[in-house]
Image (cartoon, helix red, strand yellow):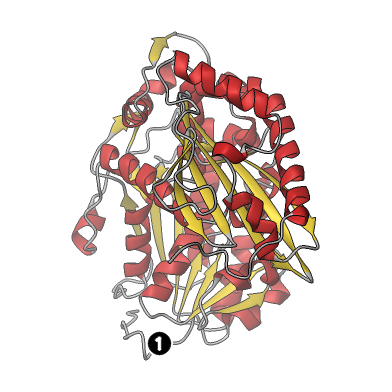
Amino acid sequence: MMSQPTTPGERSYILLTGATGYVGGRLLKALEGAGYRVRCLARRPEFLRARVGPSTEVVQGDVLDANSLAPALAGIEAAYYLVHSMGSAGSFEEQDRIAASNFGKAAREDGTGRIIYLGGLGEQGKGLSEHLRSRQEVGEILRESGVPVIEFRSSVVIGSGSVSFEMVRALVDRLPVMICPKWVRTLTQPIAIEDVISYLVEAAELPLETGSEIFEIGGADAVSYGDLMRTYAAERGLRRWMIRVPVLTPWLSSLWLGLVTPVYARVGRKLIEGVRNPTVVKDDRALRVFSVRPRGVREAIARALANEEQGFAQTRWSDALSSAGGRKAWAGVRLGSRIVDQKTAETTLSPAAAFAPIRRIGGQNGWYFANFLWRIRGFIDLLVSGVGLRRGRRNSEYPMVGDALDFWRVEAYEPDRRLSLLAEMKVPGRAWLEFEVEPVGGGSVVRQTAIFEPAGLAGLAYWYLLYPFHAWIFRGMLREIVKRGKLLKAPEDNHGPS
């Protein structure tokens, strides 16, 4: 059977499952950008609607509920299957079997032209981990439906936010000395998230001569897990020592991982049991069929870090925190390489009045709470060759982007709305302090966010040891900002001198 490609204007809806996930969220933007008409299947549509384009449709449904799939698949030419149950309680393998069977059957009954699925690399056999075996079994179940399936099998996906990359990041960032068992020498072929997305998008138009197809995809380099960690360390400017030991099985390593990277413990333990399996491309047919030319490991990691930097610059911290869900913890939320701690206060003041103390902060006006501690911190900074508090601020009323503000630098300023400060004091990492004011009802909400990107173990120790003091100071400062806003009479125009 051959499926003829069409142009974006002619085709019916493309169905995307897993649009709230790591790969699915990025694929959604790529499909919208390419002009496709996208329909997303979501268990909670209200969480997704704000994140899709105006032409994208969001429908309620669950792959574990067979009766909910028919409306979502009606009129669909191609369906992306990007869901899995590894993060759920119970047997993820059995849930994945049920979900794949439901989806394949519904796609056949609705006449779906093709299913595009992203699975995992690994040679079949008794030694294959439960996770990789389940990923490949899902592909088999989808093909058994009779609908043509394009299955991609990939190794580690490199991109800020992918579970595999975040585990590597957590290990390297937190452990200056790593005990490396035999499995660290296992070969893998990491692939950049951008290249994965390019393969998935091209698959929507791929002519299918023989029905279903399986493509193995990977980056330009086959490396060991140890090499992957060393490359990440080099890109982050970290020095790490790796000591090889003959013991420490993947199972024992998974327990240790749960202590070192608790955020990813439940999923990470299942993933790390598969590191004993080499995940390298044996069939390079994808390079001949698709136009994608995958990046190497170093470039993939560098791009992941650069894209993360850009994403943080463009993201409102409130949005980032609300999307973090269950990842909240004491001393802030881990978002990529950064720790974000946010505090809010509501007031009956207008946004202009609430923002007035914020735009005046620092210099001769002080920091509104525990100023003696700010002065001590500035003196300590001078002792270690930092800038201290001696710079003050250029204008006591109105900041400008690029201004020095004590030992901060104004990185962003939006009158009556936002002030973002980049730290220039000596710290083991990078730090930001951001204030935002938004109208709420008849008043405003003032949002204060501390962001820290620790440099290795010293940076983590700095953040967590000083967090009780920082939390006390920042809570007091936010409280005083609201009080001072009530005392100040904000002028009608706070935009500053023209």
Q: Residue at x 67, y 66 (%)?
A: 47
Please, is residue 488 above or below residue 212 in the view? above
Residue type (three-letter) at the residue carrying disc 1: Arg
Instruction: Name the residue nearer the viewer: 490 or 222.
Output: 490
Q: Residue at x 71, y 47 (%)?
A: 481
> Measured from the top left, where is residue 383 in percent x and y?
46, 13
**In the shown orientation, is residue 150 left or right of residue 415?**
left
Q: Which residue is mark 1?
A: 11
> Measured from the top left, where is residue 435 in percent x and y?
60, 50
> Measured from the top left, where is residue 106 in percent x and y?
61, 76
The answer to whether residue 269 is visible is yes
Instruction: Name the residue nearer the viewer: 197 or 334.
Output: 334
Please, is residue 219 above or below residue 428 in the view? below
SS for tag 1? loop
Give the image quarter of residue 260: top right
Instruction: Name the residue nearer the viewer: 224 or 158.
Output: 158
> Measured from the top left, where is residue 339 in percent x and y?
57, 37
